[in-house]
Every structure is written in C-alpha cells, then in structure tokens.
Amino acid sequence: MTLGPGRTFRFVAVRVLVAGFLGSSSATALVAQQARDSTSHLQVVYPADERAAARAFLGYAEGVYEYIDTLFGGALPEKLHVTLLKDARSGSSGPELHLSLHHRAALQAVYAAELSRVAEREILGESYELQGYRFVTEGLANWVEARYERQLGIEKSRDIWAAYAYVLEATYPEYLASYELAEEELGKNVVDAVGYSFVSHVFQLHGMEGVRSLLDAMAVNVDVCSSLSDSGADCEEFVDGWQSALAEQARRYDFASLPEIWSLIEVSGQGDLREVGLRVYIQNPESSEFTFFVSYVIDGEHFEEAFPAERSEFRAIVPLGTMREGTKLLWEVSVWSSTVLAWRKSGWQDQVIR
C-alpha cells in the first residue's frame, strides 16, 4: 500500500519472548503485528493498530529532521531508526530513537528533543556522558523541544522552574556539575529548566553559532567554564550575566506562598527494639487540604507512603514502625507545589536509632 511519494509500509511479524508468566524456565513466545515504513532519513516501526498516529508522525518527521540537522550543522546521522511505542518512555541511543505514543499531543516536540540529543552525541562523542555537562545537554534538548511546544501551544513551565531554582541558589555551574544530585534535590524538570535557561542565554548573546561553538569546545574539555572560554566567551562574565538574567526573571514571580516542611525523628521504648515515628510540620499557604509523601530507607530498603493533610498548618507524627537500636534511617518529606508545579522537599536526612 502506498502512503505517498517514496513512502510505503508493510506488516512485519515481531517475535517477543515473554518470561515470567510460567516461570523463568517456561517462556512463552508471542507474535505481535507491527508495521514498517521509511522516508529519506528514517526507518519507522510502529504498532499496526496505530496506523493513524504513524501517518501523522510521518507527515512532519522529515521536516523536523531537516530542521534539527541544519540547526546542528549537519550532525545527524544519514539514517535513523525510529520505533513508535504505546507504553514506554521516549529515549535515544546512537541512531535508535524510541518515541512513546503516550505523548501524542506533544510527539513532534518530543521527537525534536530526541533528535537534538542524537546530534549532541555525534558532536560531543564520549564527552556527552560527562555528568558535568548533563545540565547543558539536557537544557539544549529542552530548548529545542520548547520551540516546537510553542507551535503546539503546550509549552512547559521552564521559566518559572528556572526562577525557582535561582531562588533556591541552585543555578551555579559548580552545583549543577553534580547533575544526579541536583536532579534528586530539585527534580528533573527543574534542573533541566536551568539548563534551558543557560542555553537560552548563550543563544541570546551569540546565536546558534555560539551554541555550536560551545558544543565543539565541550567535545575537547571536561568542564563548562573551560568550554565557555574556548568557545570565545569569558566564563565569569557569562555566568554573572546569566545569573542577573535569572534574578530579573525571579522577580516576576511570587514565591512567598510556597509550602515549607520540617521533620524530625522521635524514638520511644527501651532495649534492642524501639518504636520510631516521624514528627512532621508543614506550612502550606497554597491549600488547606493536600497530600504529603514520606520516603524513607531502612537498611537499604526503600519505602514511600502518602498521607492526607487537612490544615494549611499541619502537625502530625507518622509512625514508621519498630526498629532495632543502631538502625540507620534516612527520610524525606515532599509536598507538591501548585505555584511552581514542582515538588517541595525537606531534603534527605539521616539518623541512627538510639
């Protein structure tokens, strides 16, 4: 069947081994029907019953590829393999892209972001894996994604997230170099929004040529400041200007009503076994009824529980159970903030039960 000039599709049988239904020694072979299509630069596989979604994707896929390839100076591989999936996370590895149809309304923007990541990998090589660069590379993918989100009318709250991070004094390269820690403390959306702000500032000062120059410098350096210097920018001057822009942005928002969280451990009883509770105090001007979450780790085992709160100034003791003396307990309390559309967290704390 012909879909258009140069585009055809055919059904292919994909064998999937599913283990676990009858035990690891009794895997069951299932055959799922999928369709395959191709364009000038793409090989696309998708569920056969998602033909309409695939056709919509194919309608813009080549145009987005050409735009991103031009944006990154021809860095994209000549051929890419794209798999459209019903229930999975979008991602990319080398020339392989996996796009979740869960993001149907935003699929074009998600696709553009994944193409950006592919281009960045091609330019940076092994440097792409450096944790100290993650806030920049993810920020750049978000910057590309935001361009398409604006066209679709679904742009995320990156400006307020970046301003929020600035208020938390969490927008400096030295802090962001530990990407995984920043992601844990701020949330991925927030730390990536800081990277988006960083890339936006590069673009505002030096255009896309400046962004590409920075990527070229990152390919042969191991830190952002050296890369800024090698790309022709004064690192200290750039960071000062970026922080000033973030400060100006933060003044546009009112963060006075953010939830505040305090918590401490209370231990009772004698002997080897102790009753442990978590005293929680939350001030939440945003709402008089909300849910808070307690995450805790006991001897390496992770737990999470949700609790309702019915007062904007909430106090309670959450029982965590019986623990042996000497047990190391880690905990964190979280509340969703409707002001910044992000989690407010107490931060991880730890205590040995005595």
Image (cartoon, grey):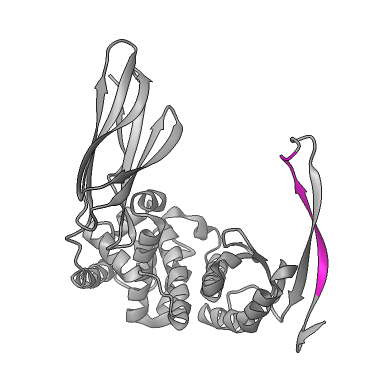
Asked which quadrant contains residue 160, the reply is bottom left
- Magenta: main secondary structure equals strand
Q: Is residue 197 above or below residue 274?
A: below
Residue located farthest toward the bottom when viewing the structure as drawn: 5
Residue 65 at x, y = what percent? 60, 79
- Seen at 38% across and 55% down, the residue is 187
Q: Is residue 255 above or below residue 69?
A: above
From this viewpoint, is residue 235 visible?
A: no
- Apparent side of residue 4 relative to residue 237 in the rendered image (left or right): right
Question: Which percent across, then down, holds residue 280?
Answer: 24, 38
Looking at the picture, tell me which residue is in the foreground, 211 or 79: 79
Residue 296 versus residue 79 in the image, above or below: above
Image-quadrant location for residue 143: bottom left
The N terminus lies in which quarter of the figure? bottom right
Residue at point 19% right, 66% down? 254
Q: Is residue 345 among what the camera can see? A: yes
Residue that sits furthest to the top in the current view: 271
Residue 78 part of the magenta segment: no
Instruction: Tell me where residue 142 appears, x and y as whole percent.
Output: 44, 69
Give the residues drawn in magenta, as a range. Answer: 10-21
The residue located at (80%, 52%) in the rendering is: 30
Residue 188, percent from left and from top: 41, 57
In the rendered structure, the answer to whether residue 72 lies left or right of residue 338 reads right
Dividing the picture into quadrants, the one containing residue 133 is: bottom left
Indicate whether 91 appears above or below 234.
above
Nearer to me, 96 or 21: 21
Please identify the quadrant where the C terminus is shown. Answer: top left
Asked if residue 106 lies left or right of residue 184, the reply is: right
